[in-house]
Image (cartoon, rainbow, N blue to C red):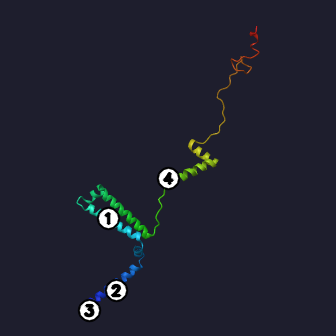
Amino acid sequence: MASKKKKAAKAGAGALSTGMAVKDNPYVQRLVEDDELRENLRTAFESAKKAYGRMANGKGPAKAIMDDKKTQKDLKETANSLREAADSLRGAKKKRKRRPGRVLLVVVVGAGLALALSESTRKKVLDGLFGAEEEFEYTSSTTPASSGSNSTGEPVGSTSSSSSGSDDG
């Protein structure tokens, strides 16, 4: 009978040391204190149990996962709840969902202001889009024809006072 008492005493001491370790464990403290963490774990357990029940119905787990929408929903809910519980345990803040539309709007407005207010930026953008503007001087490849009949510099076909005097009379 003495050996039974010794075993019971050892078990009690082990339970006491385990209880002390659990009491000092920050994860267990969070589990005891955080209602949202417990709710996430409860939701994960219940949805995993539902998904397991649907997969064990005789069709086979692969077919249930691929074809059964309710199983997919339960598994997704399980994963989300476990992720939230893990984030809560780690102490991670909930991430704000970024709106890509808002970020894009800020970028577009900023680029528009930069183009409107900075001439050098505007030139760089236009040069990038359409190529650099080349400065050149125009030289004609044809030479003006000098004819003897029109030495006055007037266009051909125009009437002048010196050549139209013989038609008066």
Quickly name the residue at label 2: 13
Q: Earlier in the sequence, mark 2 or mark 4?
A: 2
Mark 2 Cα-neighbour bin, 10 Å: few <14, some 14–19, many ≥20: few
Indicate the quadrant where residue 27 lies. Answer: bottom left
Residue that label 1 marks: 48
N-term mark: 4 or 1: 1
Q: Residue furthest left?
A: 58
Inter-mark Cα distance, 4 to 1 = 36 Å
Is the residue 14 above or below the residue 169 in the image?
below
Mark 3 or mark 2, which has the lower sequence index?
A: 3
- Report the Cα–Cα distance between label 3 and label 2: 16 Å
Would residue 10 appear left or right of 145 to someone viewing this image?
left
Amino acid type, callout 3: Ala
Name the residue tied to disc 4.
101
Q: Residues within 10 Å of mark 1 (few under 14, many from 20)?
A: some
- Residue 115 is marked as none
What amino acid is found at the position of numbered circle 2 in the picture? Ala
Coordinates of residue 4 in the picture (x, y in percent): 26, 89
**Mark 3 touches mark 2? (CB < 8 Å):** no
Crowd band around label 3 with a 10 angstrom C-alpha radius: few (<14), some (14–19), many (20+)? few
Tell me the mark number nearer the camera, choosing from 2 and 4.
4
Mark 2 or mark 1, earlier in chain: 2
Q: SS class of the residue under badge 4?
A: helix
